[in-house]
Amino acid sequence: MTHPPISPDFVDVTTAAGTVRGRRRDGSAAFLGIPFAEPPVGELRFAAPVPHRPWDGVRDATEFGATPQRIGLAEVTIIPEPSIAGDSTLNLNVFTPGPALSADRGLPVLVWIHGGGYLAGSPASPWYDGAAFNRDGVVTVSISYRLGFDGFGWIADAPHNRGVLDWILALEWVQENIAAFGGDPSRVTVAGQSAGGGAALTLLTVPRAQDLFERIISLSGVPTEMTLEQAVEAGRRLAWLGGVESTRKSLTALSEQRVLELQTQLSPLGGPPEEDPVRGIASLLKEGLAFGPYVDGRLIPRATVDAIRAGQGSAKALMLGATDHEFTMMLAGSRHRLPDVPDPALLTRVGASMEAAGRYTADHPGLDSAQLLGQFVTDSMFRAPALRVAEARAGSTAPTWLYRFAWRSPVTGEAGHCLDVPFFFDMTDAERVTAVAGAEPPATLAGDVHGAAVAFVRTGQPGWTPWDAGDHQIRVFDLPSVDIRDGYEDVRSLQTVPADR
């Protein structure tokens, strides 16, 4: 174990497992790569996570730890999320304005779960730096978790939903240790984007996690609805492709690289481009992701929306929404393989009924076929489910706030997937933000989006009327940001689309 030299540039904090040394920054301190679990290798590879054993001396926490991600997801490499080699991949990062704060005046805590389709993503992104939240009095934690088959693949004799167990153990670490970093363990908000937003919604309905957080923020999150049967089919398929049995012993014999190759063959994300792009969209919408949280009947007893309707998580305040054009550009490179004039039959091929396809095409004039399909994916996978979650929480004891991120980037002309993340963190000067947001991302918009997040984390009130207060008011983040009524009315007809999903 290496030790940075003792100097005013460093600060030590003692956790339950031992002392960590972080780096002081302007107005805050960063503690990186703190392990919350033993390395998930060898006998622990497909096991439930095990809390990290104590260590002697001072552990260096000035560099990011190893990441479960070994290679980025080509289709969604918008956010810079580095892959870092090493075995101790279950670690977290703490950004704090004051590790010396006393427990009786601890600060609220934001725990961030990264996205990446449950196949990729890294907590080491500069977009996830907690500096602005620290400036505004919020301790920020970003966590890692096992991805793809290692985290979510069904194995006959292994625990279900190992990636979810990783989230839970990280949150338990926060409960036990965050006071030492100046945070209040009773004021924890879990937030995430894309797969991370889906993770936040999943945790909202996991009974075992209810005592570990106070509130939820879901950015572009997709509710969990994969069945155990679907998970079993995918797990057995991967084992068959690998020429082994669906057991921990047999699958452990497959190298990490080999499992990555096999899961790519099963996933609608990360593989080679489809010769028929419509077929790829149909697979994504009808079957969902090959690996991700699934309803196992115990840890995750019900699909997210069903659990919410049954009252699970009703005491937790929820803020959720999506960008207006999440995946509209996903078929931009396939325009030459699609009809020039949009045809409702395209939408029936991806699961819409003929009636819904005709209505949707008529309601979206001026789009070419690629844009129409991309917007249909946006609305089916992200915007309509956000509305469905909000409606399912009718009668909850805690409010629900719904938003839209509608600001169109000058680079793409759209409010695309991931565009809202640097505004949420108020990190618009971070690496590669200008590639998606232009040379001068509007500071006013960052102030609005980040300010709403800070207000919600600190007080449970993001600054507009809750959606379930009676008039279905939402916040539209644009220039200027406005409050309007029922801003998701354009996706109401898609709440049951695709019809045969």
Image: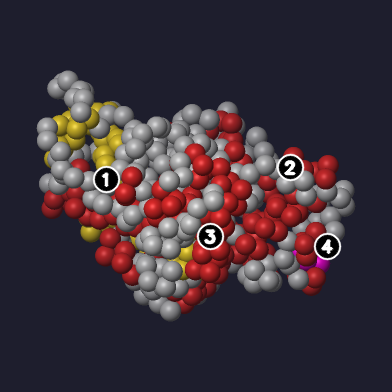
Question: Would residue 238 be seen by someone viewing this image from the given angle?
Answer: no
Mark 2 and mark 3 lie on one chain; the one further toward the N terminus is 3
Residue with the mark numbered 4: 345
Residue with the mark numbered 3: 236
Closer to the camera: disc 1 or disc 3?
Answer: 3
Segment tinted magenta in the rendering: 357-361
Residue with the mark numbered 1: 38
Question: Circle 2 sits in a helix, a strand or a loop, which is it?
Answer: helix
- Relative side of 295 to 413, left or right: left
Cβ atoms under marks 4 and 3 closer than 8 Å: no
Residue 332: mark: 2
Is 50 drawn above or below residue 360 in the view shown? Answer: above
- Relative side of 146 to 369, left or right: left
Q: In which quarter of the image is residue 463?
A: bottom left
Closer to the camera: disc 4 or disc 3?
Answer: 3
The residue under the point 61% across, 41% down is 75
Q: What residue type is labelled 1?
A: Glu
Mark 4 and mark 3 lie on one chain; the one further toward the N terminus is 3
Give the Cα separation between the discs numbered 2 and 3.
34 Å
Q: In which quarter of the image is residue 310?
A: bottom left
Q: Which amino acid does label 2 sit on?
A: Ala
Is 405 drawn above or below residue 60 in the view shown? Answer: below
Question: Circle 1 sits in a helix, a strand or a loop, which is it?
Answer: loop
Mark 4 and mark 1 lie on one chain; the one further toward the N terminus is 1
